Image: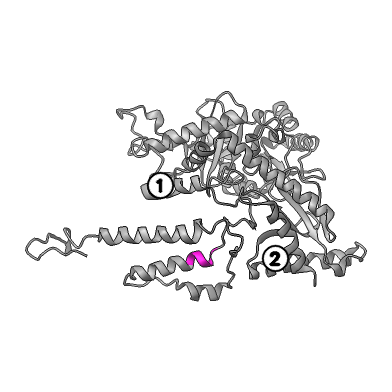
Amino acid sequence: MAFPSMKSAVLVDGVVLNGPTTDTRAGEKFVEEACRLIMEEVVLKATDVNEKVCEWRPPEQLKQLLDLEMRDAGEPHDRLLKLCRDVIHFSVKTNHPRFFNQLYAGLDYYSLVARFMTEALNPSVYTYEVSPVFVLVEEAVLKKMIEFIGWQEGDGIFNPGGSVSNMYAMNLARYKYWPDVKEKGLSGLPRLILFTSEECHYSVKKSASFLGIGTENVCFVETDGRGKMIPEELEKQVLKARKVGAAPFLVCATSGTTVLGSFDPLDEIADVCERHGLWLHVDASWGGSALMSRKHRQLLHGIHRANSVAWNPHKMLMAGIQCCALLVKGKSDLLKKCYSAKASYLFQQDKFYDVSYDTGDKSIQCSRRPDAFKFWMTWKALGTLGLEERVNRALALSRYLVEEIKKREGFKLLMEPEYANICFWYIPPSLREMEEGPEFWKKLNVVAPAIKERMLKKGSLMLGYQPHRGRVNFFRQVVISPQVSLEDMDFLLDEIDLLGRDM
């Protein structure tokens, strides 16, 4: 710290305003050393399969190892760097080639640099005057995403998560049909009903609760054996709701369900929506990236008929968490009409530039991160063809794994996947000759959790499991990262067998 002399000190309320000042050189050195640590311990080790995916510790032990207490006095930089190293060491390495636990994985170097830049610049994307570059970047990215959906024109906004995008869409649909709700609230509304599949993301139910629609007014439409919404059942439910005096207003279809990776039949669902005047929202948070692939975009056939789409480039396209867009068809300015609060200290209409670039009033947020920049940087680096190859390779590796599962004793597919979700059971030798009755399924139910515990404690890989709609616990393997190799697919099956063969 640099202290001024007593003669030159300026005091206000007992505080010296011209000192002490921040020690800039020490701060810069700390940043430099921390960045070196990140490079050595995170980036350079990202693709090293000899590194552990995780260094598992139970919560109480980890609390002691990390020294989480905040004290009255600050701590020296060498101590802070030690803490940084510990944080990295005990964190899950989601960029590891054998991290398969979630619907995101891997390390995209270009989006990482974009994140470094935005963290250093610390912008907020609400007005052009404070965030000129990032406002224009978001506009450019949204325009390209709208083109891939197949719309002639549209609008959009980047949000903190696909769950928020789904909530935006639900509120937007309600506002479209009952615009007075913005000012007069819920009291004058009829009983609203929305429809989604039994396989939908849980955010649909949460959004209905949050927006005052009520979870009892979410109608879960029956799905077929592959987890796809049945359009005929949807229409039956719409007619049933109208018959009891309710007001159907929204259908939320899913392109890429969380567990099975199923894609609802969008064209047939759109027909139902058109016949009954309903808003069609497509939750393509997971599956939307298939639009980048000429080979696989047919999975979302009919998406151009949707009124709104949620799409998360941080998943299959690896733009870095979080990077999630809500896209709205047409140029009705509905987003701004629905969400604008016209804050006069931010969105003055007499500014000297084109205030249509002050896009923040379309958002329920005030401060908003420049998430589009990460995707833009990756897209600029790889090009559309590179992003397409990323999708094609992930799905080709998924197909390889499926064929290997079919060949191997003790592995059983739930179903043939149509996307990157490969769901399967591992059946240990002790159960392989057992008849598939209640006792068999009861014993098989404990296998996946037990193997998961062993793999976490060993740190060799991370893989998700779950029960699902009457099926006992099974593994869900998801392929995303381009750092994943054929050898990693083989290792996955070998390691599961190694960890579970004695059960």
Contact between marks 2 and 1 (CB within 8 A): the answer is no
Q: Which residue is mark 1?
A: 117
Residue at the image point whose x is 71% and y is 33% from the top: 298
Q: Secondary structure at mark 1?
A: helix
Of callouts 2 and 1, which one flags the residue occurring earlier in the amino acid sequence? 1
In front of the other: 171 or 17: 17
Residue 116 on the magenta segment: no
Residue 62 vertical position relative to residue 224 in the rendered view, above or below: below
Q: Which residues are magenta?
A: 87-91
Number of numbered discs visible in the structure rendering: 2
In front of the other: 401 or 44: 44
Q: Where the C terminus falls, by quadrant? A: bottom right
CA neighbours of label 2 inside 10 A, class few (<14), some (14 to 19), many (20+): many
Residue 21 vertical position relative to residue 290 in the rendered view, above or below: below
Q: Secondary structure at mark 2?
A: helix
Q: Which label number is shown at residue 452?
A: 2
In front of the other: 242 or 231: 231
Residue pushed farthest left?
A: 7
